[in-house]
Image (spheres, rainbow, N blue to C red):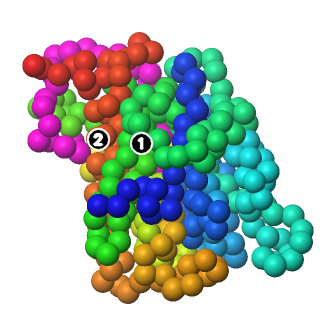
Amino acid sequence: MRTVPELGFSVGHATREDTGVTVIYCGERGAVASVDVRGGGPGTRETDLLEPHNSVERVHAIVLAGGSAFGLAAADGVMRGLEETGIGFPVFGEDKPGPRVPIVPGAVIFDLLAGTQRPSAEDGAQALCSALAGHDDTTGSIGAGVGACAGKIRGGVGSALVDVSPYTLAAVVVANPVGQVIDGETGRLFGAPDKPAVDVGRFAAATSLAEAHLNTTIGAVLTDAPLTKAQAKRLALAGHDGIARAVRPAHSPLDGDTIFAAATGRVGETSASTAETAPGVDAEVLASLSSAAADAVEAAIVDAVVNAAPGLGLEAYSSLLSC
């Protein structure tokens, strides 16, 4: 199976003691992108631009950050870093001199109860440098997932790949929901009931940073299919089904659940080096990709939780295992 870099994306992190930033770099020519915001308390940047009826087709990076609204500042550092490398939307046209404006949407999680640090523009620039240097497939308590709390246990950053031949679809998710990821009666993960159960008694007694009920699951669905902007919107919509499977309840009034979708069109796209508008896929392929988007987001949430380490006053799935 192809890997995330082969799809045209790379991921980098900036990790602090109690918060952080995760950047998804979409390549020099960017990726066709859209977004769906389902939570009632979102913290986002540039989401209006991503609606299918608006003009700009491609984004150059996606920022996922801790720090609540403070964390939106991380995108400034990503923009500056991309501008310095000559990457961005050519204001006067591709072949004409003039400024380039990097298109960098983003979303943040609420992790302010984890500590006093706030992600900065410098953290965003550091995470971008990491992504430009090569894909970091580390998951768990890293980057934007450092201060994440998944219900009663520690959340984190997770990822997953799904083969939808001839295409591949991936998800990168910061799992920080108000709802639980573990069934309190069985001790098993909602998103992966086949995995070992945790000790139900210890889980029931676990403390949570989510007492204020101000949490969020954010992430991105990534593919090499040649999607149109409207089709990317469909993938973002479908990705939320994965949250609903892995988290209960999901999409609460104070969650900020946000899923981006981005497509490089590396497979099946003609004139990939110059095309600004992708040709799209047929309805049957889009249905398969949408199903895979839900599967990938669900699996990425599980990956985040399983690989999280106990810390910041929180138990983790790994520390609550029965055996």
CA gap between label 1 and label 2 equals: 15 Å
Q: Which mark is residue 137?
A: 1
Q: Earlier in the sequence, mark 1 or mark 2?
A: 1
Q: Quadrant of residue 208?
A: top left
Q: Which residues are magenta?
A: 190-219
Front one among 188 and 135: 135
The answer to whether 199 appears left or right of 102 in the picture is left
Residue 225 point in image, percent of width and height: 43, 74
Q: Main secondary structure of the magenta part?
A: loop
**In which quadrant is the C terminus drawn?**
top left
Amino acid on which disc 2 is placed: Val
Residue 300 point in image, percent of width and height: 34, 46
Front one among 122 and 72: 122
Q: Which mark is residue 302?
A: 2
User: 10 Å neighbourhood of mark 1: few (<14), some, or many (≥20)?
Assistant: some
Q: Which mark is residue 94?
A: none
Q: Quadrant of residue 307?
A: top left
- Residue 207 in the magenta stretch? The answer is yes
